[in-house]
Amino acid sequence: MQRPKVSKNKSILQKHLVLGVDLGGSKISTAVVNRQGEMLSRDHSLTPAARGPEAVIKAMVESMSTALSRASLTTAQLEAISIGAPGLSNPETGVVFTSPHLPGWQDVPLKQIIEDKMGVRTLLINDANAAALGEMYFGAAKGARNFICITFGTGIGGGIVIDGNIYAGSLGTAGEIGHMTIDTNGPRCDCGNTGCWETLASGTALAREARQRIAAGAETSILAQAAGDIDKVTAEVVHAAARQGDALAKELIAQISYYVGVGLANLINIFNPELVVIGGGLSSIGDMLLEPAYRLAGERAYRAPFNCVRFARAQLGGNSGVIGAAVYAFREIEKTKRNRK
Ligand SMILES: [Zn+2]
């Protein structure tokens, strides 16, 4: 599939608008996005995840309406709504199979529900795949044809791009790199398995390790960074302590970095990507986390694919989900138009 020529006919294409939705386990973001990847309006709200799918969908619709009214638009002016959702989903049927961070979501026909409520063609894509598309068009992966976009946050999300297209697999659930087993005896994962990559190399993993060591009586300033409240120990708190030279914080980041490197080596050996784009909250730790991880990946992966891979930091930050979902919609619209010809 050819990439849409986004730069041509700018005045006409400006009218082509998609409402991008980034459905997260804790936050819903929506934005009206044009073909240049510019956001005309935005809205953020909290995800009432614990109250189940119905409440979450209601919150999504409210957030979409807010984003539309902020841009003084109606649904009639939208080409599509495009939702990036966490967990396993089928982009063809628009069904969310399951989502570890959204309790109660089991085979939810999200695309159809939103289409019925909003009266606009709706698309559904995995959130990490959306992020990869966003980076490919408007971020760190411009011009790349074979790359992997990894989001290190609460969990680990992955978007695998092969020859310019998301690799979706036979059902559409491919790219769940956060759930490749790294340590069969490792911690229990939300997916039900043990020792998944995201139980060892995510922000959640860093916070969990820190809490365990503090509870076991380790000498550290991490707890003080969290105002003495162990429940407030997060990856950011550990990073802050490490920056001030705390030995345990540095040790824990090195441990996470080791597992980041192990996973990277696996991906490089399997996919031989030209580029690995790294984003998500945990990656804001930066060189302290990433440099040793790249070095370890170099020690563990085959030399030839490692020597040709570039590493880059994601550029779209918190906007990658909404922009990437919109990119997905624009690509699908182009596809439909071409098939009609
Ligand atoms: Zn898992």
Image: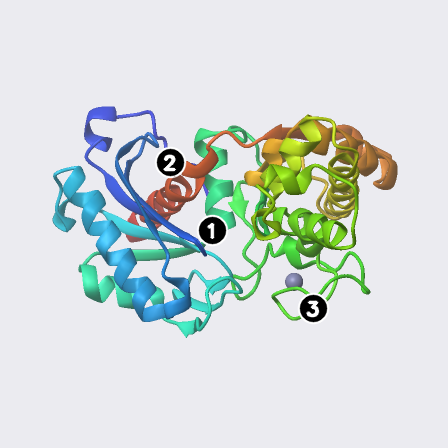
Which quadrant of the view contains residue 12? top left
Report the side of 47 relative to 242 (left or right): left
Q: Mark 3 or mark 2: which is in front?
A: 3
Label at residue 34: none
Quick check: marks 1 and 2 in contact, CB under 8 Å? no
The Cα–Cα distance between marks 1 and 2, rounded to whole angstroms, is 21 Å
The spot of residue 233 in percent (x, y) is: 61, 46
Neighbourhood count class around disc 2 (C-alpha, 10 Å): few under 14, some 14–19, many 20 upward: some
- Which quadrant of the render holds ligand 1? bottom right
Residue 143 visible: yes
Q: Does residue 341 lie above or below 37 as drawn?
A: below
Q: Mark 1 or mark 3: which is in front?
A: 3
The spot of residue 210 in percent (x, y) is: 71, 48
The Cα–Cα distance between marks 3 and 2, rounded to whole angstroms, is 40 Å
**Which residue matches tag 2?**
4
The type of residue carrying mark 2 is Pro
